[in-house]
Image (tube, rainbow, N blue to C red):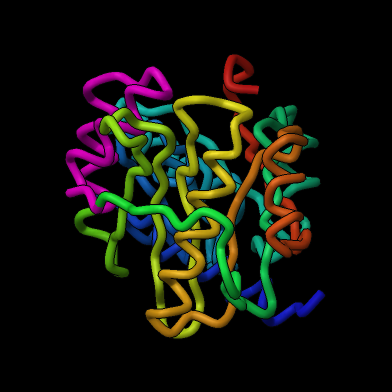
């Protein structure tokens, strides 16, 4: 595994998921979006600042209380201070929602896809509505999702894969930042029919045409079906992250 590619995937993922509601508190990036995605409403402990940990957590708690959101810290191999995970665990903060980041070191599109697919490009609101409907998201979460992807630092590209009658089979989002592509929100409306894989292959081919030569994605560590799909596409495990929160209902 290329450690530099893992770090690039982490930094690119932060850019791709950036909501308008974020701020820096002593080196920690706090995100306060009301959306469903935890990565848009959590703390990313990017740098070790000057405040003692308890003081820093107290300041963050005030920000999340003011926003009406539960406080959660996203813990990665690069979180600071380096022993953050152990110190939060010692406080009794539960760990939950572990996810794996997988990377593709050499993005080469299929030479001759067995069944070429036509992708329907979607506006941010239309895409968020389709994904939200598949996931049972609230209207508030759907609106926040649309706002986030429309205003992210990297250009949003969302697509639907439809059948001949226009019925939705799968949808997904990609971002292309230089030679690195990220896949997000891959969701099949009709499960276990190969539509997610067809969509991913089409998105990777499109990303390659736009200059991407490597790729990354995030998947729940307990989602064996999706992990097997991504492995067939050539993705390999890069690193794992999880969340910790003092609110036991989240864990």
Measuring 47% from the left and 77% from the top, which residue is drawn there?
A: 208
Give x and y (percent) for residue 117. 42, 53
- Can residue 82 be seen? no
Q: Using the rendered view, name the quadrant where residue 228 is placed.
A: top right
Name the quadrant of the C terminus: top right
Position of 219 relative to 106 (above/below): above
Measuring 77% from the left and 36% from the top, which residue is drawn there?
A: 224
Give x and y (percent) for residue 129. 25, 31
Give x and y (percent) for residue 87. 76, 45
Of residues 224 and 52, the one drawn nearer to the viewer in this rendering: 224
Magenta stretch prevailing secondary structure: helix
Residue that extends furthest to the top in the rendered view of this protein: 249
Left or right: 76 in relation to 191: right
Position of 139 relative to 28 (above/below): above
Name the quadrant of the N terminus: bottom right
Measuring 47% from the left and 59% from the top, which residue is drawn there?
A: 202
Left or right: 224 in relation to 106: right
In magenta segment, residue 145: yes
Position of 20 relative to 170 (above/below): below
Instruction: Write the start and end of the magenta stretch as one range.
Output: 121-149
Of residues 117 and 2, the one drawn nearer to the viewer in this rendering: 117
Give x and y (percent) for residue 57. 53, 44
In magenta segment, residue 10: no
Q: How many marks?
A: 0
Measuring 53% from the left and 37% from the top, which residue is drawn there?
A: 72
């Amino acid at each position: 595994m290329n450690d530099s590619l893992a770090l690039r995937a982490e930094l690119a993922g932060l850019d791709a998921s950036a909501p308008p509601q974020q701020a820096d508190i002593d080196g920690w990036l706090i995100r306060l979006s009301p959306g469903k995605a935890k990565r848009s409403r959590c703390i990313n402990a990017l740098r070790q600042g000057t405040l003692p940990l308890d003081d820093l957590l107290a300041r963050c708690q005030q920000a999340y209380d003011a926003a009406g959101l539960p406080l959660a810290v996203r813990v990665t191999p690069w979180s600071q201070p380096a022993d953050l995970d152990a110190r939060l665990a010692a406080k009794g903060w539960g760990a939950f929602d572990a996810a794996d980041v997988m990377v593709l070191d050499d993005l080469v599109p299929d030479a001759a896809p067995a069944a070429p697919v036509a992708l329907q490009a979607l506006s941010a609101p239309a895409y968020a509505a389709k994904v939200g409907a598949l996931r049972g998201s609230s209207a508030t979460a759907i609106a926040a999702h649309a706002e986030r992807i429309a205003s992210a630092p990297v250009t949003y590209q969302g697509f639907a894969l439809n059948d001949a009658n226009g019925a939705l089979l799968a949808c997904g989002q990609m971002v292309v930042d230089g030679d690195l592509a990220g896949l997000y929100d891959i969701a099949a409306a009709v499960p276990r029919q190969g539509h997610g894989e067809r969509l991913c292959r089409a998105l990777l081919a499109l990303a390659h045409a736009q200059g991407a030569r490597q790729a990354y994605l995030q998947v729940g560590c307990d989602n064996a079906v999706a992990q097997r799909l991504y492995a067939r596409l050539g993705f390999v495990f890069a690193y794992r992250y999880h969340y910790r929160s003092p609110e036991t209902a989240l864990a």
